[in-house]
Each structure stands twice: as structure tokens, then as C-alpha cells.
DNA sequence: CAAATTTACTGAACACTGTTTATTTTTCAA
DNA sequence: TTGAAAAATAAACAGTGTTCAGTAAATTTG
């Protein structure tokens, strides 16, 4: 009987429809400003219907987050190609920061927003981000092995590199660099120089 | 006639009462989860009364933010005492990160939350944060002058140091370091080691 | 094919939120 | 004591996430 299979397809199609609308609106207006009623209106269903396909608003975010991490990982796969680990480290940093600056709302969803992976959360979530982090760790351990960077401990190095990248992106996304009184147009340039300088400083 | 003066006093007292309650609740429950009705209930007034003393909820946050920056600056004044600029840089970093980790909700208000200093905002706000940032810049320029750190440009260095500090605190506050699978109890230690390592790496 | 049952969907409600306004209460000078 | 000015509020508005009883459609059964 193909009916139950068609129903399964229908269900997944509906989930995708909701998710696509949600993602689009999260990116355009941000997570907080997007209401379930707006999403429902967009897909021309009642708000209550969404709850038949997703537990709550956070689950919607959770799914969008998954896709976002996939996007970032794809970007890494595309842009991070160098064999030399230090060169690769540069590519990782640039790719990360560029991704964050180019997709600020997406970055917000992934790393700045509170819900839903907030502290008390299940660990399976971490499959999402752990790919990229493992990638970084791998790269850094090669750098250390070949004595290309001044760090000794891989974990501390990874923490530093990630914190630097995240710090740059998130301070920019939240406009905190305003305190530096730079030209708006220069800022992105300065951030890129900044990470370039970081790589230079930490390498032998 | 001392009546109008007493009224002025009364008004300021009321403002302070509201602000104190707001601050307390922001720190306990976070900005988003604190409603004006809750604040009003706490001070035993109607919600509408708050609007006689503050324009909106953001203005409340704005004022709390001011106090938070004062607190951070006080902390700097207390803890950052070394004459040697590199030693002072260490103290700045430790003080910043320790403050952030010890006052996570406050840090959230200052640097992570969206409202109210979001991008389109008046510049006078920046008196708040610019003290601390100027302090960092001063310290770094001395470090560079005395060839104690491997940076050449003060602004790039400042950007890096701040991004590192903010990155460490904000990733921790938002539980993103979970991906590293460390013991909860170890995490704070590792963060401190991490910034220690950073200082070591960037200095000659 | 018709009736019964399962599935899909929705309107309306609940308990909230920030904010505004008309109304009441209080204060204080004449 | 009265009348105007100031302070406080109740009630409403428009919005939120979420739940649930009830309707409409699709499917299975007799």
C-alpha cells in the first residue's frame, strides 16, 4: 500500500514548507521578531497547524540551526583546501569570519542567540558544530606538530582561535566596535586585517 | 520654597527604586524574562507608573547598562595596578574575563543583548564603554612602544585582545564550549589558561 | 456505496508581553 | 474649603507562544 508512504511524503513536504518559510523569515527579520502567526500566514495555514509538525518555536530554530551548520561546513569544504596547515588555518579563520559577517542573522542563530541549546541541553545537538570544531583541532595539531604556531596545547589553541573569530564577528554583529569610531565602510576591512595580524602574531 | 526641591528628590528616589528593582530582576532572570509588570509588582506600583519615569523598557536597560560599565571600570581601577604594561595587559584581560564569568547576566546586558545600543544608536552611549577601551588602547600602545608584544598596530591589537576576551566569555555564557566536552568544573580553569596562553603567545 | 473511524486542520481561548490613554486619586496653593 | 495641578492607575490595545475542543476531509470498514 503506497498510501501510508505518500502520507509520509506529504508530512515531510509540509515540514519542509514550514521550515523554509521559518528560515527565510528568521534571516530577514531575526528569530525574536518572527512570530508563528507570521510564519503561518506565509504558508497559508493556521498557527496551530505548525504545532502538529514541530513541538514549539525552539524546535523550529533547532532545525534551522542544523541547516546553518551544514552551510558553514560546506563553506569550509569549499574554501579550506590548502595542504600546508598554517595556510589552512588562515583559510579556516577567514572562512569563519567571512561567513559570519556575510550571514549575520544566521550567525546570530548559531552562536549568539540564547535558545535553544542553552546549557541544560541534550548533547546530540553538538553533532552540528563539532564537525567544524574537529576540523579546526585537526588543523591546529598539525600546526603545532610542525612548529608553525607558538601554541603548545591544541585545546587551548583551538579555544583561542575560535574565541578570536567569534569575538570579532559577534562584536561586529552587535555593533560594539562602534566604540572604535571607525568608518562603517572600513570596519570589515579592519576586521580582516585584524585576523590577518592575529595569524601573523601567533605563528613563528 | 523647598517643596519643588523635595518633589525633585522624590522623583529621583522613585527612579532609583524602579532602577534597583529592574537591575536586580534583570540579573536574576535576564532582561527578556523580566516584564514591566513584574517590576511594577515588586515596587508595588502600577505598570503604567514606570512609564512616568522611563520612556520604555529599553531606557531601563540603558540605565542598568550604564551602571554595569561603571562596575567594570571600577573593577579595572581596583585590579589593574601594575606599572609594567605587559603585566597590566595581563591584569586587564583577567579582570575582563573574570568579570564576565562572574556576572554573566550583567555581561549579557552589556555586550551580547541586542537592544538598545543596536547599530542605529546615538553616540553618547559610547561614553560608557569607551573608558575601558581607551584604557586598553593606552596599555597596548605602551606594550608596542616597549616592544613587549608582537603587534605593530595599536588598533588591530586592541581589536584582537578585546575580541579574544569577549569571545571567551560570550562563548562560555552561551554554552558553546560544550562542543569541547570538558568537565563543567574545569571549564573556567581552561578559559583562564587559555587567556594566559594568549598573552604568552603574543608577547616576545 | 454508505457508515464509521481515523487523520488533518482550525477558531477561539489562555496567559502572557510592552505600551497608551482616559480616569481617578492625591497634593498643595489660593 | 475649593480648584487646579500632579501623580497614579485601571483598562484597553495589539501583539506573543501555546493549547484544546470542535470541524472538515480522507481513509478504512461493513
Image (cartoon, coloured by chain):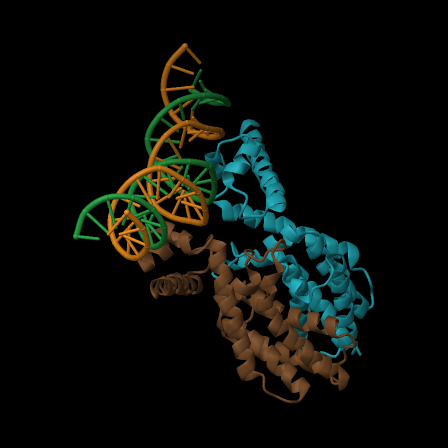
Chain colours: A brown, B cyan, C green, D orange
Q: Is residue B6 left or right of residue B158?
A: left
Q: Is residue A82 above or below residue A98?
A: below
Residue B22: percent from left, percent from top = 58, 41
Tally of numbered tags:
0
- The foreground one among A21 and A114 is A21
Which residue occupies 57% across, 31% down? B10
Q: Foreground residue, B29 or A80? A: A80
Which residue lies at the image location 59% right of the left edge and 34% below the top edge? B13
Quarter of the image containing the C terminus of chain A? bottom right
Q: Residue at x 68, y 85 (%)?
A: A86
Asked whether the viewer can see residue A190, the reply is: no
The percent coordinates of residue A165 (x first, y second) are 62, 72
* Left or right of residue A6: residue A67: right
Q: Residue at x 76, y 84 (%)?
A: A145
Q: Nearer the viewer, residue A81 or A1?
A: A1
Position of A176 with respect to A63 (left or right) is right
Is residue A30 in sight in this rendering?
yes
Image quadrant assignment for residue A97: bottom right
Image coords of residue A101 (percent x, y): 52, 72
Instruction: Examine the image and state in which quarter residue A87 appears.
Output: bottom right
Quadrant location of the N terminus of chain A in the rendered image: bottom left
Residue A77 in the image: x percent, y percent?
Answer: 55, 81
Amino acid at each position: 500500500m503506497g498510501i501510508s508512504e505518500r502520507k509520509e511524503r506529504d508530512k515531510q513536504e509540509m515540514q519542509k514548507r514550514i521550515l523554509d518559510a521559518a528560515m527565510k523569515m528568521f534571516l530577514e527579520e531575526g528569530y525574536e521578531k518572527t512570530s508563528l502567526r507570521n510564519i503561518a500566514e506565509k504558508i497559508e495555514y493556521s498557527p496551530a497547524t505548525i504545532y502538529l509538525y514541530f513541538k514549539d518555536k525552539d524546535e523550529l530554530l533547532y532545525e534551522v540551526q542544523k541547516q546553518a551548520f551544514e552551510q558553514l561546513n560546506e563553506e569550509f569544504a569549499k574554501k579550506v583546501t590548502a595542504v600546508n596547515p598554517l595556510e589552512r588555518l588562515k583559510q579556516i579563520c577567514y572562512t569563519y569570519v567571512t561567513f559570519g559577517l556575510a550571514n549575520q542573522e544566521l550567525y546570530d542563530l548559531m552562536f549568539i542567540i540564547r535558545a535553544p541549546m542553552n546549557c541544560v541541553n541534550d548533547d546530540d545537538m553538538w553533532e552540528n558544530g563539532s564537525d567544524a570544531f574537529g576540523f579546526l583541532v585537526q588543523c591546529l595539531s598539525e600546526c603545532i606538530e610542525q612548529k608553525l604556531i607558538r601554541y603548545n596545547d591544541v585545546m587551548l589553541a583551538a579555544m583561542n582561535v575560535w574565541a578570536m573569530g567569534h569575538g570579532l564577528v559577534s562584536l561586529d554583529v552587535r555593533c560594539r566596535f562602534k566604540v572604535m569610531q571607525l568608518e562603517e565602510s572600513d570596519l570589515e576591512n579592519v576586521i580582516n586585517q585584524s585576523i590577518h595580524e592575529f595569524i601573523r602574531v601567533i605563528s613563528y
